[in-house]
């Protein structure tokens, strides 16, 4: 099969930053689906892994990136239930296995679901990774109530892929106030479209939040620049509030700054369940199944804002260049 990956961590404009490979078709594990990939999206995780994985010496085998896919089931393993050949599925994959930048991909059926039927594969490909991340941040890590409770949720990085879904989930599934960070008119407008009740400029987060008459926020969903926003989050979080972040940092942070307020801090990595085959690994398939129904019911909107065509080195390099600017609004998708 045709696939695009890398052997060395190189700047995106280097000739060998991404390479086309001719690889054997994936071998199925008992719980796997074999999927003919139709569309993918490109995430910051793709660029980060390309840059960080092999900075000093070449990998022995190509790393195939790609953490979102929509495609058609070509075969199923003997332990698979709920899927058959010909089903169109979607998933965010497993960081420990070859990704979706390929014609074929093997994926555990427990982290996949039937794709929504009311939108194109290109549109649907914008959702799996960000949906799972946003859902896990809100409802597994922060444990934001899905009832009539009215609390405040600060979403740092509201215009990005994960932020866009976080704002929609807050608006559609809860009664909470969603406060999104944005510093440009276009990103602020996007956040409002996604469901933000309020916009604050992240360049002076504390002052701009307090200028709106809000001393504290009950929850913080953090998606960008942990060391840049740590002090502000410690200041703004309410006593007994909760913070969850997906943004790692090499800087040392003062966790004790949260102690006086008895604040909880929770990491979120969408790949944890699949990496460790946790007992609740199938929860990701259930989340995607519910999201597919919400897309088909018109409750949740797809967030693709830019789309390319073709499984090729140049197409993926162009996508990585855009992602690396850090200014992407919504999601970038590629149709094969």
Image: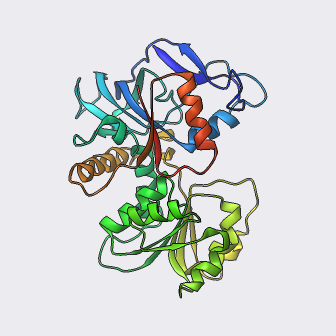
Task: Count up the numbered dots.
Answer: 0
- Residue at the image point whose x is 49% and y is 29% from the top: 99
Q: Is residue 158 visible?
A: no
- Residue at the image point whose x is 52% and y is 79% from the top: 217
Q: How is the image coloured?
A: rainbow
Q: Is residue 227 left or right of residue 318?
A: right
Q: Is residue 125 left or right of residue 254?
A: left
Instruction: Give percent across and percent down for residue 296.
Output: 22, 48
Q: Is residue 40 left or right of residue 58?
A: left
Instruction: Give percent across and percent down for residue 258.
Output: 65, 75
Q: Is residue 329 visible?
A: yes
Q: Is residue 33 above or below residue 274?
A: above
* Quadrant, the C terminus: top left
Instruction: Give percent across and percent down for residue 240.
Output: 53, 80
Q: Is residue 81 above or below residue 240?
A: above
- Residue at the image point whose x is 69% and y is 21% from the top: 15
Q: Is residue 210 above or below residue 81?
A: below
- Residue at the image point whose x is 25% and y is 53% from the top: 294
* Quadrant, the N terminus: top left
- Quadrant assignment, res 56: top right
């Amino acid at each position: 099969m045709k696939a695009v990956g890398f052997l060395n961590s190189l700047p995106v404009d280097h000739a060998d930053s991404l390479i086309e490979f001719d690889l054997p078709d994936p071998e199925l594990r008992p719980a796997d689906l074999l999927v003919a990939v139709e569309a993918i999206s490109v995430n910051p995780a793709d660029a980060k892994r390309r840059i960080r994985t092999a900075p000093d010496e070449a990998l022995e085998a190509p790393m195939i990136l790609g953490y979102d896919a929509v495609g058609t089931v070509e075969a199923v393993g003997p332990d698979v239930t709920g899927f058959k050949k010909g089903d169109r599925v979607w998933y965010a994959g497993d960081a420990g296995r070859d990704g979706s930048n390929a014609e074929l991909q093997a994926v555990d059926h427990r982290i996949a679901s039937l794709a929504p039927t009311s939108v194109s594969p290109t549109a649907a490909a914008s959702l799996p990774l960000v949906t799972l991340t946003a859902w896990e941040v809100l409802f597994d890590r922060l444990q934001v109530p899905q009832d009539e409770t009215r609390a405040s949720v600060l979403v740092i990085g509201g215009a990005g892929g994960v932020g866009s879904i976080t704002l929609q989930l807050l608006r559609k599934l809860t009664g909470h106030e969603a406060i999104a960070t944005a510093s440009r008119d276009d990103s602020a407008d996007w956040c409002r479209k996604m469901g933000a009740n309020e916009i604050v400029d992240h360049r002076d987060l504390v002052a701009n939040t307090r200028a709106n008459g809000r001393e504290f926020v009950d929850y913080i969903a953090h998606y960008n620049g942990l060391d840049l926003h740590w002090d502000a989050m410690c200041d703004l979080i309410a006593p007994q509030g909760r913070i969850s972040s997906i943004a790692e940092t090499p800087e040392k942070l003062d966790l004790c700054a949260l102690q006086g307020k008895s604040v909880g801090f929770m990491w979120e990595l969408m790949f944890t369940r699949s990496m460790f085959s946790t007992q609740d690994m199938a929860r990701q398939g259930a989340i995607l199944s519910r999201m597919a129904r919400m897309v088909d019911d018109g409750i949740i909107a797809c967030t693709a804002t830019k789309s390319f065509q073709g499984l090729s080195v140049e197409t993926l390099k162009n996508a990585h260049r855009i992602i690396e600017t850090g200014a992407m609004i919504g999601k970038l998708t590629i149709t094969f």
